Amino acid sequence: MEKVNFIIETLNIRFDKGTLDMDNSSDMLTVTVGKSIIHEVIRFLKEDEMMGFTFLTTLCGIHFPDSPLPLGVIYHLHNLTENRRIRVKTFVPQESPHLPSITPLFAAANWMERETFDFYGIIFDGHPNLQRILNVEYLDYFPLRKEYPLEDPTREDKDDRFFGR
Amino acid sequence: MTAFLEDNHYTTLNLGPTHPATHGIFQNVLTMDGEEIIAAEQTIGYIHRAFEKIAEHRPYYQITPLTDRLNYCSAPINNLGYHMAVEKLIGIRSNKRVDYMRIILMELARITDHLICNSVIGVDSGALTGFVYVFQERERVYEIYEEVSGARLTTNMGRIGGFERDFSPSAIRKIREFLDHLPKVLKEFEKLLMRNRIFMDRTIGVGGISAERALNYGFTGPNLRAAGVDYDVRVMNPYSSYDDFDFQIPVGTQGDTYDRFCVRQEEVWQSLKLIRNALDNLPEGDYHMEVPEFYLPPKEEVYDKMEALIWHFKIVMGEVNVPVGEIYHSVEAGNGELGFYLVSDGARAPYRLHFRRPCFVYYQAFPEMIKGGVLSDAILTMSSMNVIAGELDA
């Protein structure tokens, strides 16, 4: 518990407090940071000896269409020696969804970022090969964004009003 | 890549998408100098089924069948792992009997997963016999699945909040038979390959990766442990009462194909021990938790009991309140850390469900691991990494 407070304090001192939001109420410490410092925060978490989050568990996108910064990326990092996890979030506007790539820090981020680009259209600057990975290259939309319906909306033979989301 | 192609010296070789040795549909474009691999580039996504999108439109209890199709060699781990993730979100504490039943099924699934992977390494190095031999044992496990869930490959096992039925006496008998039978087969299988000169020559020093690179590439599971890192979710973040049991985590030293084979083989022995312990100490109790708002009631009760009918209606029509929040839950699947990142906005379906598929993460390292080796070694490396196309593509 004390270590969590230490991490929160260190991050607050190290990075501008205004861009950070920390929440320890869910299953792990969740830090929301501005996109301008995301790379620095991840690098600090990985390379600082006291932090030691050297393992990138996963990285995925999320879409909140009604929010001013609708597209988000969520990083899950793991400190394997102390068995501590941290969740780092950052949000970008839909018009210019640019984020710095963390592939220089984690080789594992390569495909994860490609997948996030593929599904959400978030562009990771500095990625060595930012192409679609699971979908076909000529797809002209980003399928996991909320505005894209799962099924053809013009279908009339199926009424899902009471069963849909 | 194109620079290589311009040089006439190199050959481009398509390994896949439907090559018999890839054991799944994914492609590797290899640049070869004679038989030496200079570069490789993977293409994946041939069986992408948009599970993450579908999951955003389905109620929680209907997502279990999707998870079956991730790693279809060990479907129960995915099913039960997903159930545990949802239970973590809604804050259910599982009872011991459910935990132990889950351990038994997940370890059976791990055994089948490892048996398939290891016997396929044998097949790809020219020893078909072992493969056919352990497939008989896999068949026994599938009969146990049948007893528990009614299905064999895509099991759709259990429910949120427990199981739909208890272990029947014949299921327990079949598990015991399997426990008695497997060690003999496993010993013979090991006798065939473990100290086999040809097999050792083909696998030692092939497709190795250092612990540091493996961690950087996000390796988990047997592939990481073969490189010498003792990271196992069952020990690090014990779920489903794994902390009640005493078992060992085998680790390798070289991170090569032979180490991966040995680590998986030893894990099968440990799984056997775990199943035996769990079955011997199987606590009395209910096979599901008392969570009527999430646990679908048995159909016969729905027809003649008021309560059950109400809950059935509420669950199916999405009238239950799911807490708002986000959780990450991971289990040790056959290939490594299978994670579920679940975001709920209180609706009937998850707002976002992301699967952390171990295969997808570690298969990135494949070109690095086979570079400089020969083609026949690349085949062995691939089969020893246990890349499952369903998990790769989600």
Image (cartoon, coloured by chain):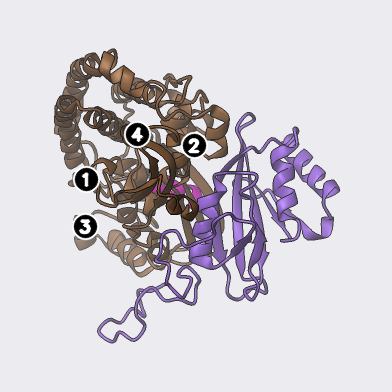
Residue at the spot of label 2: B219
* Other residues around mark 4 within 10 Å, as few (<14) / some (14–19) / many (≥20): many
Q: Is residue B191 above or below residue B358?
A: above
**N-term-proximal mark, 1 vs 2:** 1
Residue at the spot of label 4: B97
Q: Is residue B145 left or right of residue A21?
A: left
Residue at the spot of label 3: B299
Q: Magenta region's main secondary structure?
A: helix
**Mark seen at residue B153:** 1
Q: Is residue A147 left or right of residue B63?
A: right
Give chain A's shade.
purple
Q: Position of residue A69 (x, y in %)?
A: 66, 71
State how far apart marks 4 and 1 are (Cα): 24 Å
**N-term-proximal mark, 1 vs 3:** 1
**N-term-proximal mark, 2 vs 3:** 2
For discs 1 and 3, the disc positioned in front in the rendered view: 1
Q: Position of residue B112 (x, y in %)?
A: 26, 33
* Residue range of the region highlighted in magenta in the rendering: B82-90
Q: Secondary structure at mark 1?
A: loop
State how far apart marks 1 and 3 are (Cα): 24 Å
**N-term-proximal mark, 4 vs 2:** 4
Do the numbered discs 4 and 1 sit on residues whose CB atoms are within 8 Å? no
Do the numbered discs 1 and 3 sit on residues whose CB atoms are within 8 Å? no
Q: Position of residue B302 (x, y in %)?
A: 23, 60
Do the numbered discs 4 and 2 sit on residues whose CB atoms are within 8 Å? no
Q: Is residue B223 above or below residue B339?
A: above
The chain letter of the brown chain reads B
Residue type marked 2: Phe
Residue placed most toward the observer, A67 or B93: A67
- Judge whether residue B281 can be spotted in this image: no
Q: Is residue A157 left or right of residue B93?
A: left
Residue type marked 3: Lys
